[in-house]
Amino acid sequence: MSNSSFQSLDASRIGSFVIGFVIGILSFFSCSRNQKDSVIIAGSTSIQPFAERLVEVYTQKHKNAKFNVQGGGSSAGIKTVQTGVCNIGMSSRELKPEEKGLIETVIAYDGIVIIVNQKNPLTDLSLNTVADIFAGKIKYWNEIGGTKHRINVIIREDGSGTRQSFEEKVLPDKAVTVDALVQDSNGAVREIVANDPNALGYISYGLVDNRVKALDLDSVVPTVESIKQRKYPIVRPFLFLTNCPHQGLVKNFIDFVLSADGQKLLQEEGLIPIN
Amino acid sequence: MKERLIEKVLLLIACSAIAIILLIFLFIFIEGLPVFVKTGVFKFIFSSNWAPTKGHFGILPMIIGSIFVTLGALVFGVSFGLACAILLAEFAPKGTVRILKPLIELLAGIPSVVYGFIGVVVLIPIIRNTLGGPGFSVLAASIILGVMILPTIIAVSLDALHAVPLVYKEGSLALGATQWQTTYYALIPAAKSGIIAGIILGMGRAIGETMAVIMIAGNSLKIPISLLDPVRTLTSNIALEMGYASGMHQQALFATGVVLFIIIIILNTIALLTIGRK
């Protein structure tokens, strides 16, 4: 029952739809920029704020350089460097034997501190006590001289460099308690501890601020000096990883980070320089 | 001739939609199969030891976590949602409905990360200070997910109630029943299949929600016993570890996806059978 005008309406409609579709696809491609002169830096959430600060300072002097800094955790950073998705991977732990083969550059050292809420009267713990708390043997604050509340233990996700460095030193052969809350960044752990009087967690020394309290470990106060001299027991390297020899913007940036200016900047932010 | 062409094109599009779903399931299943073979289906589903870096893949805590959190969300969502739909359909004055309905539809447009953020900043401290525990809990996840599925349940239930033929209501009132008796004994049973469809949709959203749950549920690996225990769901497990998982670990995450798929199919089948029994 279709007459000719109905048929032509159909054909022109389909035709215009196809043309519109093709134009849409083509304009999508015209928006992509030349990606060669931008660098993607991804990985450890411990290193992320420092990388962002370094990028900020670097791009003040080199206005054409483009960087993209992301988190995801040390293991994610290593994986994305291996697959070529990002240019520089950030890792806050040593590489495992099966991950070797990437080019590692140590940019700083950092301690991992145990943090509690500001309202918590505790100031000092022994490494064995910390191990027992994270293994779930000590469950209540009154077992270490506090209130009758439960200790809310906060850990990082499996792929975190902070977590692996921490467990290597503190829990080499015990498993972490299944009661622990899992968060996916240093910032999230710090946020929870800052708001919960019964929480206890670990973060990078460089990320401690005045909303949380860092505990002494085995009577060693965590400071730049005690970490530098390795008196403080939990120290780990911050690594920049690439899967090919440094060149271009990547080389310039890493040279800047290793230079006196870059190291001074990291030291001011709370990290330990490499010399 | 044109008619048949259009018919065939629509049939093609419908088939491709089904084909995409089948392909996704096939892909996830093939990726996850090595884990089912190596760890064994029974051990994968019923072991509570999830330690992927050491080779242990047991997802029981996450299965129980997903089920608890979804059930909790349904308790909040269905009770408040159905009550609201009944109110809007039968008891509220027209002016109120005109204001409330768009507001509820607005709730559906809020991104899940915003819900999660509000949960962390507002709800978690309240739960921690009044009820104890770390605050990150099954209760928190249930409340936030319940709010997230409210617009779905309200909208679909409202449509179902409006679709009941007017003769049901008029006949009941003519026989001397009060408005509430009419609503409870005549209208709701008549709208039952639509209401259950709304509940299924809400349940689907709750079980698949990832972002908000990661932020407020605590993500611990313990099987939750009380409402105040932290919990990890199947979706959170995948999202937390996908970024860095490789090899067997990544395959285990795909296997988790398969289990999620199957749970959703089971839940939907139960719900459809419930409608069918009417």
Image: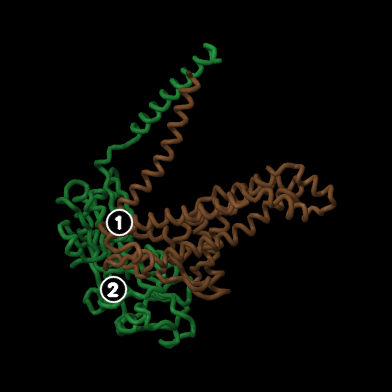
Please name the residue that numbered disc 2 is placed on.
A167
Q: Position of residue A242 (x, y in %)?
A: 20, 53
How many residues crowd around disc 2 within 10 Å: few (fewer than 14), some, or many (20 or more)?
A: some
Q: Position of residue B261 (x, y in %)?
A: 42, 53
Q: Colour of chain A?
A: green
Q: Position of residue B227 (x, y in %)?
A: 53, 71
- Looking at the image, can residue A170 be seen? no
User: In the displayed structure, does residue A251 sit left or right of residue B83?
Assistant: left
Q: Residue at x 32, y 36 (%)?
A: A32
Classify B127 as above or below B188: below
**Local secondary structure at mark 1:** helix
Q: Colour of chain B?
A: brown
Q: Nearer the viewer, residue B206 or A235?
A: B206
> Image quarter for residue A134?
bottom left
Q: Nearer the viewer, residue B269 or B145?
A: B269
What chain does badge 1 belong to? B
Q: Amino acid at mark 1?
A: Gln
- Which coloring applies here? by chain
Q: Position of residue A119 (x, y in %)?
A: 47, 78
The nearer-to-camera label among 2 and 1 is 1
Classify A248 as above or below A147: above
Q: Residue at x 35, y 65 (%)?
A: B42
- Looking at the image, can residue A46 be seen? yes
Please name the residue that numbered disc 1 is placed on.
B251
Q: Nearer the viewer, residue B185 or A181?
A: B185
**Local secondary structure at mark 2:** helix
